[in-house]
Amino acid sequence: MDQSQSTHAVSVTGLRKSFGGRTVLDGIDLHVPAGTVFALLGANGAGKTTTVRVLSTLLPFDAGEVEVAGHRLPSDARAVRADISVTGQYASVDKLLTGRENLVLMGELHHLGRRRAQRRADELLSTFDLVDAAGRRADTYSGGMRRRLDLAMSLVARPKVLFLDEPTTGLDPRSRRDMWEMVRELVHEGTTIVLTTQYLDEADELADRIAVLDGGRIVAEGSADQLKRLVPGGHVELRLHDAAQVARASAALPDAGVDHDNSTLTIPTDGSIRSLKEILDRLDDPTLSVESFTLHTPDLDDVFFALTGTATKEEVR
């Protein structure tokens, strides 16, 4: 890999993985800048979890070049494991231990020593708002509390790269929002996060860049806004003062759809500054009184279904 990839926390080129005769990862490329959130978006079976298992050294791969936290796989797997952490789809805490005991145990497994492990446990209990529950057994925690404890355990050794594999599965809306806020804080502090999710709003909220994975291939990659511009459906809705103004505006905008009853025009646009400026330039008429100007752009739902061919939105939560 060239030197330009040194600023990337994760660099993957041509990654392939098959199980038996079935190809699960078909030559994917990923480059995740340090200190960002990178989301892998895809339906069940798209290859998201397989990708995370490969990058976190839990699964060998068949072909490709992989570098995580500055270390190559498979040759530097031990060094990779020292610099990463993984939180899976379901909380893996020991329910028979208290919250503090779970964290201290994890610290000792990372060779922090008893005192350092206890100090780190107290820091994380405070960070994740678990101080009041620290002495309770984890089996008394709510689902959201267990997920917070699970994430705290992943951070005991201060990993450079954190893999979150569908971290909000099964959480209620409030707990999901709490988890999102914690992810933002981690990135602010410099942690790189690779997130897999089926929740389109989650990727939209958190990710600096998103890769859409379908059938083991990356079918699109970019920021949420960049991906939304890949699919048609964007439009501007103009509401004018009266029918006479609608008639004058529609003459200047021949591509517009006209709703005479509501005195509105609908003009197709890709949402770019250039496109919007062209619309406004055509409307540069002092006799027109625009009462509202609303931009409607495709969302990630539209992007996902356009790129993957998924038939119904129920297939992706």
Image (spheres, grey):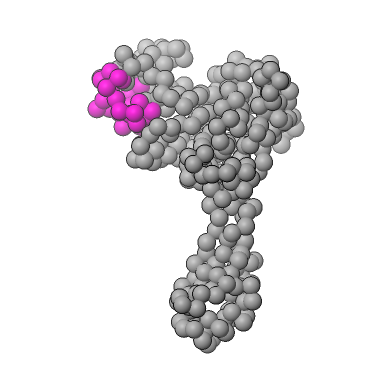
- At horizontal 66% and vertical 26% (from top left) the residue drawn is 24
Quadrant in the rendering for residue 269 = bottom right
**Viewer-side residue, 312 vs 219:** 312
Where the N terminus falls, by quadrant?
Answer: top right
Q: Is residue 185 visible?
A: no
Q: Position of residue 10 (x, y in %)?
A: 62, 31
Q: Is 285 left, or right, of 289 in this rendering?
A: right
Residue 87 in the image: above or below residue 298: above
Residue 116 in the image: above or below residue 217: above
- At horizontal 52% and vertical 64% (from top left) the residue drawn is 295
- At horizontal 55% and vertical 70% (from top left) the residue drawn is 266
Q: Position of residue 91 (x, y in %)?
A: 41, 23
- At horizontal 57% and vertical 72% (from top left) the residue drawn is 257
The region drawn magenta spans 121-148
**Viewer-side residue, 201 vs 184:** 201
Q: Is 94 left, or right, of 202 in this rendering?
A: left
Q: Is 229 left, or right, of 290 in this rendering?
A: right
Q: Position of residue 88 (x, y in %)?
A: 48, 25
Q: Residue furthest front?
A: 311
